[in-house]
Image (cartoon, rainbow, N blue to C red):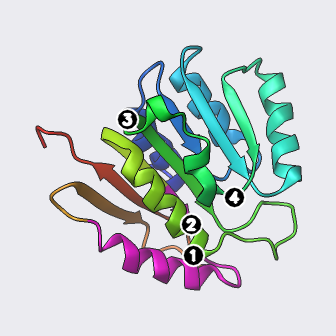
């Protein structure tokens, strides 16, 4: 009954997305989330997929070709620059974003997401979310620098105004070796 962390993360963001929406994969990595978001938004939608590593962009590009996906814009840039890539007509219409925080599997473990840039990206995305939109962060923190990012995010997420956002922390507490957990921010709609 209890879904694994990644499955639950995907369920959260997919529930906020409708065909034709704009969404962000803030850390495209190996392209798995990018493919899921692309299929959910459909041909009329668009995915902005960010990564700072060329290896991640190339791996994701291959996965998109394999799945014959054409509604993704791959962006070799830090997610903290997200506002530069969101079209003006889409401001306040972003359906959601997903972050997998930590490092790219099977790559240089010295290249990690950082608290300052992650928080900057989350704040910029939060201001462009449509009502009912969501930001889902899968927090991997069992590596050098991971605990610092985890604490910074937990502290920052408590600052979101409860009149406008709902913030969720979800994780398994009986697993060993610093299991990943989810932090999610949903922008409230008028009826919530």
Farthest-out residue, left: 191
Q: Earlier in the sequence, mark 2 or mark 4?
A: 4
User: Secondary structure beneath disc 4?
Assistant: loop
Q: Earlier in the sequence, mark 4 or mark 3?
A: 3
User: Secondary structure beneath disc 1?
Assistant: helix
Residue 43 vs 114, above or below: the answer is above
Whether residue 2 can be seen here: no
Q: Residue under circle 2?
A: 118
Whole-angstrom CA distance, mark 1 to mark 3, is 25 Å
Q: Residues within 10 Å of mark 1 (few under 14, many from 20)?
A: many
Whole-angstrom CA distance, mark 2 to mark 4, is 9 Å
Numbered circle sitting on residue 16: 3
Numbered circle sitting on residue 78: 4
Mark in front: 1 vs 3 = 1
Farthest-out residue, top: 43
Residue at image coords 50%, 42%: 10
163 on left or right of 151: left
Numbered circle sitting on residue 115: 1
Based on the picture, tell me whether residue 144 belongs to the magenta stretch. yes
119 on left or right of 104: left
Q: Quadrant of residue 65?
A: top right
Q: Residues within 10 Å of mark 2 (few under 14, many from 20)?
A: many
Q: Position of residue 124 (x, y in %)?
A: 46, 56
Task: Report the span colored magenta.
Answer: 137-160
Disc 1 to disc 3: CB gap under 8 Å? no
């Amino acid at each position: 009954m209890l879904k694994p962390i990644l499955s639950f993360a995907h369920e959260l963001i997919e529930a906020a997305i409708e065909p034709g929406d704009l969404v962000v994969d803030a850390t495209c990595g190996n392209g798995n989330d990018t493919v899921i978001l692309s299929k959910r938004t459909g041909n009329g939608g668009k995915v902005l997929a960010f990564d700072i590593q060329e290896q991640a962009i190339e791996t994701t590009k291959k996965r998109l070709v394999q799945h014959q996906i054409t509604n993704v814009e791959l962006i070799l840039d830090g997610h903290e620059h997200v506002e530069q890539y969101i079209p003006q007509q889409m401001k306040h219409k972003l359906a959601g974003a997903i972050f997998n925080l930590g490092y790219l599997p099977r790559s240089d473990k010295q290249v990690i997401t950082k608290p300052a840039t992650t928080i900057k990206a989350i704040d910029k995305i939060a201001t462009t979310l449509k009502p009912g939109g969501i930001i889902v962060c899968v927090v991997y923190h069992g590596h050098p620098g991971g605990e610092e990012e985890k604490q910074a995010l937990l502290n920052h997420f408590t600052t979101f105004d409860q009149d406008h956002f709902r913030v969720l922390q979800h994780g398994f507490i009986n697993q060993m070796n610093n299991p990943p957990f989810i932090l999610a921010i949903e922008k409230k709609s008028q009826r919530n």
